[in-house]
Image (cartoon, rainbow, N blue to C red):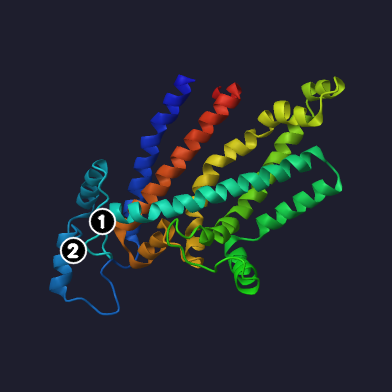
């Protein structure tokens, strides 16, 4: 197990380095620049700003300067948010995105696992067909379609929840609709994965033996079938959590949540090189860490994965 962990940990910095390098050059090769606007800057002022942010140096030199700052955990200043560093922007907005992603994941797990387990235990019945029909519907409707529908019905027609806006933990009701909107497509995937994994385990010989011995269905599912049946879900959880964080870009925009996703969209539109690179670096690190944890949990649950 230790060799398996070491092998996975060695891949982490290499993947992050390639991601950081690719992002650095791609954002600088896109048309436009951080100082472009409808009103043209004076050439002298623009040259002074480029010198301030080291943008007048050759691209390889800019890259080495950026790499050195990243090694010191300094992501540099934002080009559009004057007197504010990228580290400060991420520290202020990332907790909101993390909270929204965590709530969405918990909701997706609760809904998806419950639906998958019930569908598998009632295989080829009316309940199974309906659960899978709803999961297909959840996969078919993207978040940007569900969000305005939920706002229309839950907020405007029935006045059960606020439409948009979030001001910290003092207003937790503002997170219910965005978390529900973000979680439903993932709940549908988890339901299908749980059902498939459970059916595979429920058809194995040791389950038939447990049934023949008269073991209660609840005990058989909870003690014997669940551990093996949830392996596909555990594998999916790593990229799912990272996808929930990055997938909140649209949701944060629609529900006016001051998260990192909204800053990323604005940074891309404004060609804020440092903020785009910093955001991609944070999301990339999160994806790698989540995949690593998912792989380690899979290896712990099923030793065959290590080989």
Q: Residue 219: percent from the left, percent from the top?
A: 76, 28
Circle on res. 50: 2
Q: Decide: marks 2, 1 in contact (CB < 8 A)?
A: no
Label 2 CA crowd tier, 10 Å (few <14, some 14–19, many 20+) = some
- Point out the frontmost of discs 2 and 1: 1
Real-space Cα distance between discs 2 and 1?
Answer: 17 Å
Labels 2 and 1: the sequence-earlier one: 2
Q: On the rendered structure, is 170 left or right of 36?
A: right
Q: On the rendered structure, is 205 left or right of 261?
A: right
Of 93 and 64, which appears nearest the observer?
A: 93
Of 248 and 281, which appears nearest the observer?
A: 248
Q: Residue 175: percent from the left, percent from the top?
A: 52, 58
- Residue at 77% over, 39% down: 120
Which quadrant holds residue 40? bottom left
226 above or below 143?
above
38 above or below 212?
below
Q: Residue 202: percent from the left, percent from the top?
A: 78, 30
Circle on res. 85: 1
Label 1 CA crowd tier, 10 Å (few <14, some 14–19, many 20+) = some
* SS for callout 2: helix
- Residue at 85% over, 19% down: 213
Question: Among all residues in the image, which is located at the extreme front?
Answer: 170
* SS for callout 1: loop
Which quadrant holds residue 263? bottom left
Which quadrant holds residue 302? top right
Q: Residue 47: percent from the left, percent from the top?
A: 15, 67
């Amino acid at each position: 197990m230790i060799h398996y962990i070491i092998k996975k940990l060695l891949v982490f910095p290499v993947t992050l380095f390639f991601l950081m390098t690719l992002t650095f050059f791609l954002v600088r090769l896109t048309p436009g620049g951080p100082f472009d606007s409808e009103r043209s800057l004076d050439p002298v002022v623009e040259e002074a700003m480029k010198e301030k942010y080291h943008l007048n140096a050759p691209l390889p030199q800019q890259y080495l300067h950026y790499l050195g700052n990243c090694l010191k955990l300094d992501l540099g200043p934002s080009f559009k948010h004057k007197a504010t560093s990228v580290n400060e922007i991420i520290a202020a907005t990332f907790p909101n995105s993390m909270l929204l992603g965590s709530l969405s994941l918990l909701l997706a797990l609760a809904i998806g696992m419950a639906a998958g387990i019930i569908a598998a235990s009632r295989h080829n019945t009316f309940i199974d067909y309906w659960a899978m029909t709803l999961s297909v519907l959840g996969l078919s409707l993207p978040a940007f379609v569900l969000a305005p529908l939920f706002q229309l019905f839950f907020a405007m027609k029935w006045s059960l929840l606020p439409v948009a806006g979030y001001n910290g933990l003092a207003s937790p009701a503002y997170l219910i609709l965005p978390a529900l909107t973000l979680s439903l497509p993932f709940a549908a995937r988890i339901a299908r994965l749980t059902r498939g994994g459970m059916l595979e385990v429920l058809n194995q010989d040791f389950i038939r033996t447990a049934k023949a011995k008269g073991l209660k269905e609840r005990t058989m599912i909870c003690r014997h079938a669940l551990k093996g049946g949830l392996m596909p879900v555990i594998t999916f959880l790593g990229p799912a959590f990272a996808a929930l964080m990055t997938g909140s870009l649209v949701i944060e925009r629609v529900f006016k949540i001051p998260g990192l996703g909204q800053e990323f969209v604005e940074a891309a539109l404004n060609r804020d090189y440092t903020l785009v690179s910093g955001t991609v670096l944070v999301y990339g690190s999160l994806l790698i860490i989540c995949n690593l944890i998912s792989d380690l949990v899979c290896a712990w649950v099923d030793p065959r994965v290590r080989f």
